Each structure stands twice: as structure tokens, then as C-alpha cells.
Image (cartoon, coloured by chain):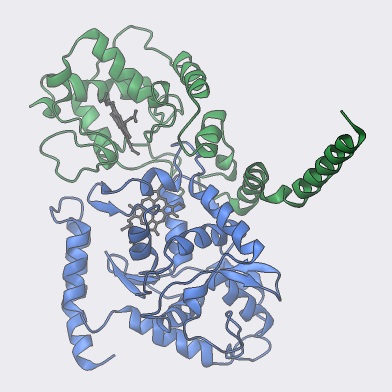
């Protein structure tokens, strides 16, 4: 990140605080506000800090085995990071499972570095303005797929099954409000209060929504991962909490990623 | 029927059953069952949002299975069941205080894992509906209710209709996207009356 980017970030952060305070009364829709942010930081996004942090973590020794993640296989062979995100989730032979980026990072951190899974998944999301390692790592990895088209395959029978299950979870109504993802994301041009909702059954919306995560949340001052996005939507759905990187969340991600196929990956994004 | 034909039928029946069992996991039913299994395993209690919330009642299960497009007979049966379960106000009155109704309509709080058990749930109405002309931050998942009472009239039949809609929107449209506020115990009878007043009272900002 260069000097001019940092300078541009300062007014952005000021804007963020004032917007958060007035969001409910504001007349500008989120999409307009986001366009304003984008303009202001046309050559930089605070998520860049997280990307750099993730790259450092990727290359640093850690865990009982004192190893780096540089031999981690994210689908295109050990150590390959370039473009991998556009083909995730995918089936991995060594685990016999379909995995998204974050569940695969858990695999690498446990096998290569010897960090126990419970330690990684205990606090997988950033809290109190502090980044989490796994989400910084994810931000670094996705950054290496910028500008590449999403091309997630359902050729493997388990990938196909994950897609089908993900589609069912998308439409799974339950809880005190009878909500499913589809309650909020299967109609075009609707919003909740002033927040525009993508219709994730429509290719263009799915591409824009999916290909812009992980993202820096201006209102929270944090970079958020896709697992976090799902987690917070399940909260709004009045559901219990999905286990981090569980089969349910990976299947749902598979469904959404395939829906976004053909769209150019544009993350890490920037959101209200 | 000759022997050859019988043999042929037997063979094709056997083949059909082989290919069926090989694909058992990939039939719609197999996938539905596997989805239910995964969902029951992969969610956990957090705060007031207990893992048992993923268990579906029949209406939720059918709307999921048919992606909100129910076969006509099933739709009629489910709606009749929801309708029969409506608890009408014992005093026969449907209208409460529109000012309390407006407060409820504004509140988007309630029943998420970040809400506390002692925090009362709001109505979330503005999340999905336009109501008072003054509130411009309204959602559009539901129809606009601006001037609802002015347009429909504040008759007893309309009060009863509005009460039932808020109590259980699924009594009229089984897979509607609106929560069943009374049926699921989100709002009390008195709160629903306040909302009926918000929608129908001529003094309410909805009708000004």
C-alpha cells in the first residue's frame, strides 16, 4: 500500500464513523454509499492490511511443528496460491471431503503446523477490532485470485452432492421467524430498511455478491471472511450458530460459488 | 404373455432396482434426508438461539421441500390448519394503541443469538414494509402498508383481517415470507392489537 492510499483512508474512516451513527435515518442507500467509499479509495482498501498480515502468517513458522503454510495444498498443488480461490470449494482426495478455503486452511494448519483444530475454530472471527489469523490468511489467499473468473466444478460426485445440499440449505426454513436464506435473497430489487439484498438465484447478483467477499466492513473496522458473512446471516435468520467451516456451511458456499461461476473475482471487497 | 417377455420384464426390473440403489443418495428424497441430517448436526446453541430451532414444523418442512410452490391440496390443508390455530382476542376487541404499535414496528430487535432473553422482541415491520410516510428507511420485502386504513376502511371485518394477518400470515398464504408473530409467540395479543391500531386507526401516522 502506498502513501497516497493511506492518506485516502483517513477521510474514509471518518466517514465510516459518521455513517454508522446515522445509518438508520440516512436517505442514501447502501449501494450509493459504497460507491462513494470506492471512489475515495480507488487504489487501496483497508483489507490490504489484512492481506499483508495474512501473507506474513503464511510464510512464518508456527505451531508445535514449527512449520510455515508454504506447502499447503489449496487445490492446485502444494504452495500454489495464485487463482486457487476461484476453484473453491472443491473435493480434496487426502481428506475425502469437499472443502472451502477456510476449512482447507484448518486442514493445513492442523497437518502442517500441528495446531489443534479446537484452537483454530475456538475464535475463528475477528473480535474487538482485532483480526483473526485464519481470516487474515483467507484474505491473503483470495487476493491472489483478483481478476480471475470463478470456475468452481461440480464434476466430482461429492462436489455435485455438496451443491445439491447447499441449495436445500438455502431454502431451509426454520426457527421462530420461518426464515430461510431465500426469504431475503430470492427476490430481485428488495431491501431490508435501506440495505439492498442480492437475489442469489440470479447469476449477476450472485456474482457481484460472492466475488466481493471477504470484505472490509467500514462499520466494523474489520476485514470479514465468507464464513463470517454466512454466520451473521444465520444470526439474522434467527437460527442457532453454524459450526465454523462445517459441512453445512461448506455445502452452502458450494451452492453460492457455483451460482457465481463466470464472474470475475473482485475481492477483497469493501462494504458498509 | 410369453416366457421371453416375462424374462425381459424381470431383467429390466432388476436393472432398475440396481440403478436405483446406486443412486439412493442422489434422489431428491435422499438429498432432503441428508440435508436434514447435516443441518441437525452442524448447528449449535448460541445464547437464546438453541440448536433445536432447526427442527421444522410441517409447514416449514413443506415450504422448504417445494421451495414455496406447494401443490394446491397441500397448500389448502396447511392454511386451514394455521387458520384454525389462530387465538382470537377473548374480549372481541382488535384495536390497541397505535403509538405503542409504531414503537414496536420500528424495533428490529428480537430472537437472534445476540439478543438477551429479557429483551422483548420488536415487530421488525419497517424491515419489510413501508408504514408511516415519515419513516423513509423502510424495507420492501412486503407490500407497502402506507394508508392501509384509509384505503381499506376501519371496519370490524378489516380489524379482524389485519389481526389475523399479523397473528399468522401463513393462514392465508402458507409460504408467505412474513413471520407468524402470534402463532410463534413472538408478539403478545396486546402487542398485535397495538399494531392493528397502527395500521387502521385514522389518527395513526400510517393514515395521515
The answer to whether one can see residue B92 in this image is yes
Q: Is residue A83 above or below residue A239?
A: below
Q: Is residue A123 above or below residue A108?
A: above
A155 relative position to A55: left or right: right
Tell me what hue chain B is rendered in.
green
The answer to whether one can see residue A242 in this image is no
Q: Is residue B69 above or below residue A259?
A: above
- Percent across and percent down for residue A88 are 52, 72
* Location of the C terminus of chain B (image quadrant): top left
A32 relative position to B117: left or right: left
- Percent across and percent down for residue B169 are 38, 26
Q: Residue at x 58, y 87 (%)?
A: A69
- Percent across and percent down for residue A156 are 64, 66
Q: Residue at x 16, y 77 (%)?
A: A40
Place residue A110 in its image quadrant: bottom right
* Location of the N terminus of chain B (image quadrant): top right
Q: Residue at x 20, y 51 (%)?
A: A24
Q: Residue at x 48, y 80 (%)?
A: A137
Place residue A7 in its image quadrant: bottom left
A148 relative position to B33: left or right: left
Viewer-proximal residue among A28 and B185: A28
What chain is the blue one? Answer: A
Q: Which residue is outermost to the right?
A: B3
Total marks drawn? 0
- Percent across and percent down for residue A209 are 35, 62
Q: Which residue is outermost to the left?
A: B208
Amino acid at each position: 500500500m502506498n502513501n497516497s492510499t493511506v492518506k485516502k483512508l483517513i477521510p474514509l474512516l471518518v466517514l465510516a464513523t459518521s455513517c454508522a451513527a446515522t445509518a438508520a435515518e440516512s436517505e442514501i442507500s447502501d449501494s450509493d454509499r459504497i460507491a462513494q467509499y470506492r471512489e475515495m479509495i480507488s487504489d487501496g482498501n483497508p483489507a490490504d492490511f489484512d492481506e499483508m498480515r495474512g501473507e506474513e502468517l503464511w510464510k512464518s513458522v508456527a505451531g508445535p511443528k514449527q512449520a510455515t503454510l508454504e506447502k499447503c495444498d489449496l487445490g492446485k498443488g502444494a504452495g500454489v496460491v495464485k487463482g486457487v480461490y476461484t476453484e473453491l470449494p472443491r473435493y480434496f482426495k487426502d481428506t475425502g471431503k469437499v472443502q472451502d478455503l477456510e476449512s482447507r486452511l484448518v486442514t493445513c494448519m492442523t497437518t502442517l503446523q500441528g495446531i489443534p483444530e479446537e484452537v483454530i475454530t475456538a475464535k475463528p472471527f475477528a473480535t474487538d477490532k482485532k483480526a483473526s489469523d485464519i481470516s487474515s490468511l483467507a484474505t491473503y489467499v483470495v487476493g491472489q485470485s483478483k481478476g480471475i473468473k470463478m470456475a468452481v466444478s461440480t464434476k466430482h460426485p461429492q462436489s455435485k452432492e455438496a451443491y445439491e445440499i447447499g441449495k436445500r440449505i438455502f431454502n431451509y426454513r426454520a426457527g421462530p421467524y420461518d426464515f430461510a436464506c431465500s426469504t431475503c435473497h430470492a427476490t430481485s430489487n428488495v431491501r431490508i430498511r435501506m440495505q439492498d439484498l442480492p437475489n442469489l438465484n440470479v447469476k449477476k447478483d450472485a456474482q457481484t455478491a460472492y466475488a466481493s467477499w471477504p470484505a472490509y466492513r467500514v462499520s466494523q473496522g474489520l476485514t470479514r471472511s465468507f464464513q463470517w458473512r454466512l454466520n451473521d446471516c444465520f444470526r439474522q435468520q434467527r437460527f442457532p450458530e453454524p459450526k465454523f467451516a462445517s459441512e453445512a456451511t461448506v455445502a452452502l458456499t458450494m451452492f453460492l460459488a457455483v451460482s457465481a461461476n463466470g464472474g470475475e473475482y473482485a475481492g477483497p471487497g469493501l462494504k458498509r | 404373455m410369453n416366457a421371453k417377455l416375462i424374462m425381459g420384464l424381470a431383467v429390466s426390473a432388476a436393472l432398475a432396482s440396481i440403478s436405483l440403489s446406486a443412486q439412493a443418495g442422489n434422489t431428491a428424497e435422499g438429498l432432503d434426508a441428508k440435508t436434514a441430517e447435516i443441518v441437525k448436526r452442524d448447528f449449535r446453541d448460541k445464547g437464546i438461539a438453541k440448536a433445536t430451532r432447526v427442527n421444522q414444523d410441517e409447514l416449514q418442512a413443506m415450504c422448504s421441500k417445494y421451495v414455496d410452490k406447494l401443490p394446491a391440496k397441500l397448500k389448502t390443508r396447511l392454511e386451514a390448519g394455521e387458520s384454525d390455530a389462530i387465538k382470537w382476542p377473548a374480549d372481541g376487541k382488535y384495536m390497541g394503541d397505535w403509538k405503542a404499535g409504531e414503537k414496536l414496528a420500528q424495533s428490529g430487535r428480537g430472537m437472534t443469538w445476540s439478543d438477551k432473553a429479557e429483551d422483548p422482541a420488536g415487530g421488525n415491520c419497517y424491515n419489510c414494509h413501508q408504514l408511516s410516510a415519515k419513516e423513509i428507511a423502510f424495507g420492501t420485502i412486503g407490500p407497502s402498508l402506507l394508508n392501509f386504513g384509509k384505503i381499506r376502511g376501519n371496519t370490524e371485518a378489516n380489524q379482524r383481517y389485519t389481526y389475523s394477518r399479523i397473528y399468522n400470515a401463513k393462514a392465508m398464504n402458507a409460504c408467505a415470507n412474513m413471520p407468524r408473530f402470534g402463532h410463534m409467540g413472538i408478539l403478545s395479543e396486546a402487542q398485535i392489537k397495538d399494531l392493528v391500531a397502527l395500521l387502521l386507526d385514522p389518527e395513526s401516522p400510517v393514515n395521515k
